[in-house]
Image: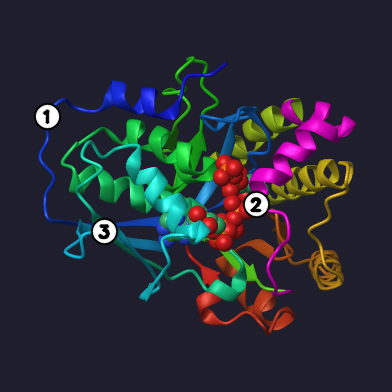
C-alpha cells in the first residue's frame, strides 16, 4: 500500500508559516509529445512512464487564493461562483485541504482558464499547477519548484509539467514517497516551433483521462508494449528537439499518440475518443503532409487534434485548415 498524499506533503512543509491575505499565480497548459498513460500508484499519481511536453505560453490558468470573508470556502471558475458540492469545487477544496493546517480558516479561490474552452484542452494540468503555486504563495511555504511540481502531480499527473514553460520532462522517479517524480524544464529552445489547436468536435467526453488510463492498464493486453515504446520515444523526441528536426519529432510524437490511442481502443469496454470529424481531420493532416508540408498531429484523451509544425510552413497550414484562428496557433517561445 502506498503512503497517503497528506503524509507525503506534511513531510515537506515548513513547520511554522502564517498565511498571507492574497496570492496570485499563473500556470500554462501543456501538450505532451511523449504521453503519460498509466499509473503505478493511483493515490500519489505516480506514472508508469516518463513523459515530455511543450507548455503553451500564455494559455493556461490564472488562480487567486485569498481569505474568505463569508465564513466558508468559496470557489469561482471563470467568474462564476460554484456550489461547494460541485465536482470541480470539491476537487479544488480537497486539494487545498492537503496543505492548510487550520481547516477553520476559509479561503476564496478564483480561477480563470484562458485556454480556448471550445478547443477541449486539458485544463486540469494548468489548473492544478496554478493552484499549487497559489497555495505555496498564500501559505508562504516558499518551496522549491521541483517539490511544487511533485505536489501538483498529486492533483493531476500532467500538472507536474505545467510548473514550467518550454519543453518539460516529467521523470518517473523511484522513491517510495514519489517526491522525485517531478518535472524539469529542458534547456532547449526552438523559436520556430508552432502548435495548432484544431477543434474538430465539441461535447463533453464521457470518460475522463483518469478512468480511461486505469481501464487501459487493467484491461488492454496491448498496454504491455507501451512502457518500452514510451521510453524509446522520449529519447528520440529529446534528440529531435536538440537538433530541431521536425520530421523526427513529428513522426515520433504522432506515432506515440496513436499508439496510446491503440491501447485505449484495445481496452474493455473499448475506449475510442475519436469522432468521425477527428478521423476526417487526421486524413487532412496526412494529405497535407503527402503534398510536402511537414505537419504532424498529436491527440490526448479527447476528439481534438493538435498540429505540430514550424513557423516557415504556417501559411500553408492555415490555408489547409482555415478554421484555425490566430488564438489557435501557439508560439511557445514567443
Ligand atoms: N482552473 C482550474 N483550477 C483548478 N482545477 C481545474 C481548473 N481547470 C480545470 N481543473 C480541474 O480539471 C478537471 C477537468 O478539467 P477539464 O474539464 O478541462 O478536463 P481535462 O483537463 O481535459 O480532463 P482530463 O483530466 O480528462 O484530461 C476539473 O474537474 C478540475 O478538477
Ligand atoms: C492523455 C494525457 O493528456 C493524459 C493526461 O492525464 P491527466 O494528467 O489528466 O490524468 P490524472 O493524473 O489522472 O489527473 C497525456 C498527457 O498529458 O501526458
Q: Earlier in the sequence, mark 3 or mark 2?
A: 3
Q: Secondary structure at mark 1?
A: loop
Label 2 within 8 A of ligand 2 by Cβ: no
What is the magenta range? 201-227
- Horizontal relation, residue 307 to residue 133: left or right: right
Where residue 308 sits: x, y (%)?
64, 60
Give the residue at x 27% y 51%: 134
Q: Which residue is mark 2?
A: 246
Q: Quadrant of the C terminus?
A: bottom left
- Horizontal relation, residue 324 to residue 3: left or right: right
**Relative to 146, is 162 above or below?**
below
Q: Secondary structure at mark 2?
A: helix
Label 2: how many Cα within 10 Å (few below 14, some 14–19, many 20+)? some
Q: Which residue is mark 3?
A: 72
Cα separation, mark 3 vs mark 1, equals 24 Å
**Of residues 150 and 55, the one drawn nearer to the viewer in this rendering:** 150
Cα separation, mark 1 vs mark 2, equals 49 Å
**Relative to 77, is 243 above or below?**
above
Q: Which mark is residue 16?
A: 1
User: Quadrant location of residue 61?
Assistant: bottom left
Q: Secondary structure at mark 3?
A: loop
Amino acid at each position: 500500500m502506498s503512503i497517503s498524499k497528506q503524509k507525503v506533503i506534511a513531510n515537506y512543509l515548513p513547520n511554522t508559516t502564517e498565511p498571507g491575505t492574497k496570492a496570485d499565480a499563473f500556470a500554462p497548459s501543456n501538450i505532451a509529445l511523449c504521453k503519460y498513460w498509466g499509473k503505478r500508484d493511483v493515490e500519489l499519481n505516480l506514472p508508469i512512464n516518463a513523459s515530455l511536453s511543450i507548455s503553451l505560453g500564455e494559455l493556461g490558468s490564472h488562480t487567486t487564493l485569498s481569505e474568505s470573508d463569508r465564513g466558508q470556502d468559496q470557489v469561482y471558475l471563470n467568474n462564476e461562483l460554484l456550489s461547494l458540492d460541485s465536482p470541480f469545487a470539491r476537487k479544488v477544496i480537497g486539494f487545498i485541504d492537503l496543505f492548510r493546517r487550520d481547516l477553520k480558516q476559509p479561503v476564496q479561490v478564483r480561477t480563470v482558464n484562458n485556454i480556448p474552452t471550445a478547443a477541449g484542452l486539458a485544463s486540469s494540468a494548468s489548473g492544478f499547477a496554478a493552484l499549487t503555486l497559489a497555495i505555496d504563495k498564500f501559505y508562504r511555504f516558499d518551496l522549491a519548484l521541483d517539490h511544487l511540481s511533485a505536489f501538483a502531480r498529486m492533483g493531476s499527473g500532467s500538472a507536474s509539467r505545467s510548473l514550467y514553460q518550454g519543453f518539460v520532462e516529467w521523470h518517473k522517479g523511484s522513491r517510495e514517497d514519489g517526491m522525485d517524480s517531478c518535472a524539469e524544464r529542458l534547456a532547449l529552445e526552438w523559436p520556430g516551433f508552432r502548435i495548432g489547436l484544431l477543434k474538430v468536435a465539441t461535447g463533453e467526453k464521457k470518460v475522463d483521462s483518469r478512468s480511461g488510463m486505469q481501464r487501459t492498464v487493467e484491461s488492454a493486453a496491448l498496454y504491455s508494449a507501451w512502457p518500452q515504446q514510451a521510453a524509446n520515444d522520449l529519447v528520440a523526441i529529446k534528440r529531435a528537439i536538440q537538433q530541431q528536426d521536425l520530421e523526427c519529432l513529428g513522426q515520433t510524437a504522432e506515432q506515440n499518440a496513436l499508439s496510446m490511442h491503440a491501447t485505449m481502443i484495445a481496452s474493455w469496454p473499448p475506449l475510442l475518443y475519436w469522432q468521425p470529424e477527428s478521423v476526417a481531420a487526421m486524413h487532412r493532416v496526412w494529405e497535407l503532409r503527402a503534398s510536402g508540408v511537414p505537419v504532424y498531429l498529436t491527440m490526448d484523451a479527447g476528439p481534438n487534434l493538435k498540429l505540430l509544425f514550424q513557423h516557415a510552413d504556417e501559411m500553408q497550414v492555415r490555408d489547409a485548415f482555415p478554421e484555425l484562428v490566430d488564438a489557435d496557433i501557439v508560439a511557445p517561445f514567443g
